[in-house]
Image (spheres, rainbow, N blue to C red):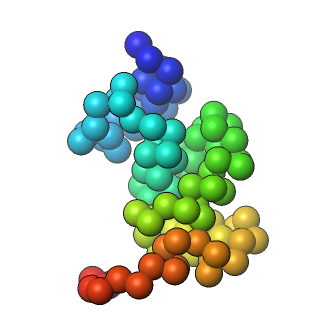
Amino acid sequence: MGKHEKFLFGLCKMREELFWDRNIDQTSSQIIIERAINFGDFDFIKEVQEQYGMEKFVHTLKNNRNLGKKVVNYWCLKLRIDRNDTQTFQNNRVWEPF
């Protein structure tokens, strides 16, 4: 069992469904943090922050283009980050579904 697999399935009980489309051995910390921000509950996010550190969490929050605007806005307010410094709010999408 690899490092990510131990973390995801050993510490977190309900995380398997967040990675249904991925081979867990080939999942990067960036993807784990992205899924935690987009779909994770507060317990999972806390564990991800402890596992990978706040610096990596904030880096992913600022630089990942696959994050939802609502969750980015929430974490920017919580962590006192200007949301305009994130890729999510700099991204000019052609089609905005919501």
Q: Which of the pair 44/76 is nearer the observer? A: 76
Residue 19 showing in the rendered view: yes
Residue at 39% x, 35% y is 27
As drawn, 50 above or below 54: above
Farthest residue in the right direction?
80
What percent of the width, then of the height, locates residue 83? 63, 77
- Residue appearing at x 47%, y 52% in the figure: 34
Q: In the displayed structure, does residue 69 sit left or right of residue 80?
A: left
- Residue plotted at (64% across, 47% down): 56
Residue 74 visible in rendering: no
Task: State the count of labels.
Answer: 0
Q: Is residue 72 left or right of residue 58?
A: left
**Residue 76 percent across, percent down from the top left:** 65, 71
Height in image: 52 above or below 75? above
98 relative to 41, above or below:
below
In the image, residue 57 lies at what x, y percent? 62, 51
Q: Quadrant of the N terminus?
A: top left
Which quadrant does the C terminus fall into?
A: bottom left
Question: Farthest residue in the left direction?
Answer: 21
Q: Nearer the viewer, residue 63 or 14?
A: 63
In terms of depth relative to the viewer, which is nearer, 42 or 83?
83
Where is residue 13? Give x, y as percent. 44, 31
